[in-house]
């Protein structure tokens, strides 16, 4: 099999402050269970793609930490971005690397490192179906998750004409307001998961045809030098660079308990809950308390008579907010003094 896994593991994850820091961002943290999110991602893919065909793309400052977490991966399979340039350049470099190693027909299964997946077998089966569609139709396939709720924090995909179990993409929709999200769910829109599957040649052809932000670097001869390539590209997400510009994009519906673990509040959906629906990690005692999220990285937390809170402790700092307001930590960080905000 010519399947390759490409895991995007960059970024800081500021919405998981104060636990997530530039030195230890959320993909390296054990947020859903006892294993870091990135470790779970590699483990989840392992039955379908072996370590030698798994690439992890991360910040240069995190490369050593990622290699330590994933000793089964060859060291060269951890790609250290010299600078953050978005998912468009990152996936293009991964495609070039795979092309050099395995040729034009190799298939990339592209995922992010910070998801929770409820049904891992169904997840892998969906990726394989997407790979077959990509091969048969020379298409760029994205997996659109069947919505579990009208979520204004996610992007949406409107499916169009049916093609061999998939659909053409009628349009991509940025994060809508709640009323629009409710309407889209009723009308059969899918969540834009950020799962992409394509053959290397098909993707690189579309990059050259539609993404001058990246293709100019390819024409300059930087395609074989990591530093030159990232210095030459203009930062852009693959969604804007290719997916919204290409006529070869198909969407395959998927239903496997996918969740974008984007905020502390989201952990209430993906962690195991106690008898009163608290999602807890660490030393926690909850008395007459329900529907809280508690992550005690230091000390012991006692909850009494409260509900719908988020409590996060680390040495020297405690965050208390509500599950709803936990989605807006960027606003909080802007208002904190630097000595508190940048505690590491």
Image (cartoon, rainbow, N blue to C red):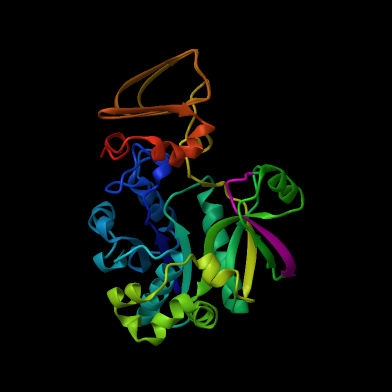
Which quadrant would residue 192 be assigned to in this image? bottom right
Percent of width and height locating residue 218:
40, 83
Q: Is residue 153 magenta?
A: yes
Residue drawn 54% across the image and 72% down it: 242
Q: How many marks?
A: 0
Examine the rendered structure and indicate whether residue 267 appears above or below residue 183: above
Query: Does residue 53 show up?
Result: yes
Compare residues 188 and 156 and report the one nearer the observer: 156
Residue drawn 62% across the image and 78% down it: 137
Q: Which residues are magenta?
A: 151-162
On screen, residue 157 versus residue 257, left or right, reads right
Percent of width and height locating residue 128:
54, 65
Residue drawn 46% across the image and 75% down it: 213
Residue drawn 43% across the image and 50% down it: 114
Examine the rendered structure and indicate whether residue 84 appears above or below residue 344: below
Percent of width and height locating residue 45:
43, 57
* Quarter of the N terminus within the rendering: bottom left
Compare residues 191 and 231 and report the one nearer the observer: 231
Q: Is residue 280 magenta?
A: no
* Quarter of the C terminus within the rendering: top left
Query: Does residue 293 show up?
Result: no
Percent of width and height locating residue 220:
37, 86
Compare residues 186 and 84 and report the one nearer the observer: 84
Which quadrant would residue 285 be assigned to in this image? top left
């Amino acid at each position: 099999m010519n399947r390759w896994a490409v895991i995007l593991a960059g970024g800081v994850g500021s919405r998981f402050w104060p636990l997530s820091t530039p030195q230890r961002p959320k993909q390296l943290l054990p947020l859903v269970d006892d294993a870091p999110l990135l470790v779970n991602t590699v483990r989840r893919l392992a039955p379908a793609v072996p370590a030698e065909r798994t690439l992890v793309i991360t910040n240069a400052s995190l490369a050593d930490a990622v290699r330590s977490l994933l000793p089964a991966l060859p060291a060269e399979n951890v790609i250290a971005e010299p600078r953050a340039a978005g998912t468009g350049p990152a996936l293009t470099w991964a495609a070039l690397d795979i092309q050099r190693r395995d040729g034009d027909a190799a298939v990339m299964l592209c995922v992010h490192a910070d998801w929770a997946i409820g049904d891992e077998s169904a997840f892998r089966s969906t990726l394989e179906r997407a790979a077959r569609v990509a091969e048969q139709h020379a298409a760029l396939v994205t997996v659109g998750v069947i919505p579990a709720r009208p979520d204004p924090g996610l992007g949406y995909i409107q499916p169009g004409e049916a093609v061999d179990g998939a659909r053409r993409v009628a349009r991509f929709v940025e994060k809508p307001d709640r009323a629009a999200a409710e309407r889209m769910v009723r009308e059969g829109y899918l969540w834009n998961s950020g799962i992409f599957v394509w053959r290397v040649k098909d993707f690189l052809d579309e990059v050259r045809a539609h993404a001058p932000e990246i293709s100019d670097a390819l024409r300059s001869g930087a395609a074989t030098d990591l530093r030159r390539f990232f210095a030459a590209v203009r930062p852009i997400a693959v969604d804007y660079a290719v997916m919204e510009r290409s006529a070869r994009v198909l969407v395959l519906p998927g239903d496997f308990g996918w969740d974008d673990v984007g905020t502390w509040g989201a952990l209430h959906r993906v962690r195991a809950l106690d008898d009163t629906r608290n999602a807890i990690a660490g030393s926690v005692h909850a008395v007459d308390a329900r529907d809280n999220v508690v992550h005690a990285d230091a000390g012991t937390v006692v909850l009494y008579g409260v509900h719908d809170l988020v409590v996060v402790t680390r040495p020297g700092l405690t965050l208390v907010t509500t599950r709803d307001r936990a989605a807006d930590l960027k606003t909080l960080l802007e208002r904190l003094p630097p000595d508190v905000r940048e505690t590491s």
